[in-house]
Image (cartoon, helix red, strand yellow):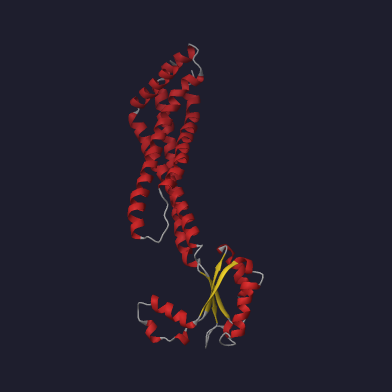
Amino acid sequence: MRLRFIFSEVWNGLRRNSTMALSVVLVTFVSLTFVGAAALIQAQIGELKQSWYGKVEVTIGLCPENARSTQCAAGEVTEDQKEQIRKVLEEGPVSALVKKVYFETKEEAFENYKKLDNQGIADLLTADQMQSSFRVKLNDPEQFQVVSDAVAGMPGVDYVQDQRDTFSQLFRFLNAATLVAAALAAIMLLAAGLLITTTIRLSALSRRRETTIMRMVGSSRTLIQAPFMLEGAVAATLGALLAVGALYASVRYVVGDWLRASLTWIPYVGEADVLTVAPYLIAIAVALAAAASVVTLGKYTRA
């Protein structure tokens, strides 16, 4: 009987304040969409790092002939110097960090350059003008600095380059996008909280006489406040479900069908990631409604 009464009051409250309830649904939907987007962007960054960082290499450029850098003032790298560098990588203190060492000759460097050249510059060069190098794959790409410190400054070494730098700008952009989404989400969540508070306040004021009578006949505070709390929770939860649906559709059709078909070499987040985020979005919506209810009901349901 009590449950029937509570649900009846919730329905009546939502019907009476349908415009405000719809506003709560829409604002919660937009704000939680930004929250979910921020979470999915971070998941995407994790996917990219896991995939790309496992493939990148450390490039140890060796001194070429007629080098201009002060590091190569002694001239082109010698065979003995190459062997010393290889020993440091394969037998030295950093050998445990090194997964594979590959030596790229000038000829191989020239052939690789020709494959990438689309401006005809390779026609003006010869293999002797290229720079040999060691390509080093690490067990943990995050340990680049340790390996760099071990070989940088050795005779014959021109530079040490971490290929992760190639992706750093992309990751900075994605992190910035996450911050923007999170900031917009925070603003919209604040707006949603204020709207929920206003909706509950209007509903409580419109039924002030009823709640006073209920208090006088001995109804518990929980029974009086439950319909108002559920009104906010229902509206916020509907907004959260709409946000989950929008994120799912975006990942399914925009990311899955369009981006994955256009850029096949990038690992993308999928529908499973949206389903992982979904419970948190619903929990945020319920918590937001509960917080707004606690702030409002103590005053406006007092007899």
| Quarter of the figure that contains the N terminus | top left
Residue ranking furthest to the right: 93
Query: Quadrant location of residue 205?
Result: top left
Closer to the camera in the image, 57 or 204: 57
Determine whether, in the image, residue 48 is placed left or right of residue 120.
right
Q: Does residue 187 lie above or below 153 as drawn?
A: above
In the rendering, at what x and y percent does residue 30 appear?
A: 38, 42
Closer to the camera in the image, 240 or 93: 93
Q: Does residue 267 lie above or below 219 as drawn?
A: below
Q: Does residue 116 lie above or below 28 as drawn?
A: below
How many labels, in total? 0
Closer to the camera in the image, 189 or 258: 258
Residue at figure coordinates x 42%, y 57% from the top left: 267
In the rendering, at what x and y percent does residue 81 appear?
A: 61, 82
In the rendering, at what x and y percent does residue 297 appear?
A: 48, 26
Is residue 165 visible to us here?
A: yes
In the rendering, at what x and y percent does residue 189 appear?
A: 44, 41
Closer to the camera in the image, 37 or 91: 91
Residue ranking furthest to the top: 217
Is residue 154 visible to us here?
A: no
Determine whether, in the image, residue 69 is placed left or right of residue 124.
right
